[in-house]
Image: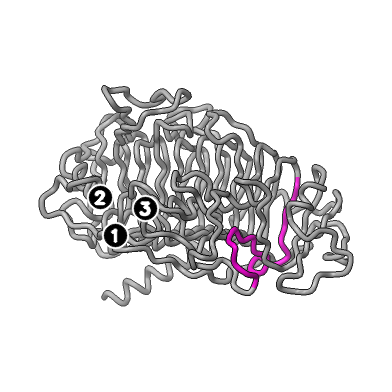
Amino acid sequence: MGSRRSLMIAVSAATFLASAAATAPTSFAASTTATRGAVHTVCNGSTSRCPRGTEYSTIQAAVDAARPGDWILVWPGVYHEKATGSEGVLITKSGLHLRGMDRNKVIVDGSDGDAAHPCPGAAAQQDFTPRSGVVVRGADDVSIENLTVCNYLAGTDGEQGNEIWWNGGDGTGAIGMHRYHGAYLTATSEYATADTSGQMGQYGIFTSNAVGPADLTDTYASNMGDSDYYVGACRNLCGVTITRAHGQNSALGFSGTNAGGYTIRDSEFDGNRTGLAPNALNNDDAPPPQDGSCPNDPTRSCTFIEHNWIHGNNNPNAPGFGLAPVIGVGVEISGGHYDTIRDNLITDQGSWGVVTHDYPDYETPPPLSSCQGGVQLPGLCLFQALGTHVYGNLFAHNGSFGNPTNGDLADEGTTAPRDCFYGNLDFGGALTSDPANIQSAAVGGRPCIGPGKGDDQLLLGELVCAAGLGQCPVPGAAYPQRTGVVLTPLTRQATMPDPCRGVPRDVFCNK
């Protein structure tokens, strides 16, 4: 029976991921058919001979020369770009298209290593200047495609270390960027410390203070101290679709602080400490809370986590900076509102397949954040989880850590309107949940009105234990403990089939 169930899970996973080909959005850069804008070509000859007529040896030089609407094409090579003290490549002009000619062979490397061995793991080969990799700062309509960025490290304060970053105004509490596109991107670091206050990559593909329409397609991220993917500081306005993403071996596969109005679909998250974590925080990613509602209808969800394969996020030895997230969770809604989690395959999660809970934020907020959307209590801001719908998901082999509340579904909150659970199934038979019978009308099922019957006692204690926040308040509770750091090696990913598509004729695309 076990082998048959495993085969069914594998077939279902393949079905979820294969559906991406039919549902993938068309990007504004890749679909361009008009040959407009000048082309600036880059080659440094580090791994292959440069085509005759190449103009620049660094990406930044081509960016500096480009005008809005221009293309920057990068020949295979290893580019140790360090344009400024905090950025490897800095783009501040709207409408630029940065594209590598081969995703696996165009490598933007923040280390001091050599071209023969890019993205090294040895400490002696790192550049410990806190720096992010390819950064778009306050520029609309910028696309980045078909390249790898690695080993840009944060400082010991956690600042920088974002491999690819669309930055619309980090820490301003305002939206400063509109429309962006990324495709065929790899973001990783092959260096990290076991010390949770040490230097490491923090975020793989990072967007903040930006709104769409935007899309990120065919991407991979791994080995981050915070998260593989991050969307933040855009309340319920984010407007980005993430399709065919793969996030591995990080503290979080996806983090969405004070963000909503996005879709994550046809993607895979595995081997992280936690899979996906939409969350509310009273911090500089203002304004809070995490709000998945529609801008014109505050009771309807416009935030969707759907058609994904989420499995085996139980890794205590993934890189981690600062406080550890809850281990063993597929999807964790932390103080979030009106999200939709539907039609996912969620398997092999040691703690919970999906868990929703309130979040008490004790941090001292900056002046621009004042517990918006939360409840101000003495010494803390309480963000209550409410209005999220979890339905139509398929679960298997969850709750293997064996603690009393572990299983497929769990809900700690008791606020109205309730987080609502219905139409979910478990391959193994009966769906497991805390509180029990979570899909019944009397507990947490339809009709999705009034407060739920969340477990704000034992489950709350076990969430504390699973995050390793001091002494575990639940006697006998056992969750995996960190013993070091283990990195996943950089592997080949699918490259863009035709990197010359939509590009005016030039020395690289001589058509």
Tell me if label 3 and label 1 are in contact, CB under 8 Å: no
Secondary structure beneath disc 3? loop
The residue that label 1 is drawn on is 482
> Closer to us: mark 2 or mark 3?
3
Tell me if label 2 and label 1 are in contact, CB under 8 Å: yes
Residue located at (66% from left, 37% from top):
138
The residue that label 2 is drawn on is 468
Any part of residue 383 in sight = yes
The spot of residue 213 in percent (x, y) is: 63, 41
The spot of residue 157 in percent (x, y) is: 44, 44
Q: Is residue 301 magenta?
A: no
Q: Main secondary structure of the magenta part?
A: loop
Q: Is residue 111 magenta?
A: yes
The spot of residue 116 in percent (x, y) is: 63, 74
Secondary structure beneath disc 1? loop
The relative height of residue 114 versus residue 204 in the rendered view (above or below) is below
Amino acid, disc 1: Arg
Task: Give the camera-side residue of 384 and 45.
Answer: 45
- Magenta stretch: give its range: 96-115
Task: Give the camera-side residue of 278 and 118.
Answer: 118
Any part of residue 218 in sight = no
Q: Circle 3: is it few (<14), some (14-19), or many (20+) Cα within 10 Å?
A: some
Measured in 3D between alpha carbons, the distance from the residue under mark 3 to the one under mark 1, in whole angstroms, is 10 Å
The residue that label 3 is drawn on is 196
Asked which quadrant contains residue 452, the reply is top left
Residue located at (23% from left, 43% from top):
440
Task: Give the camera-side residue of 357 and 81.
Answer: 81
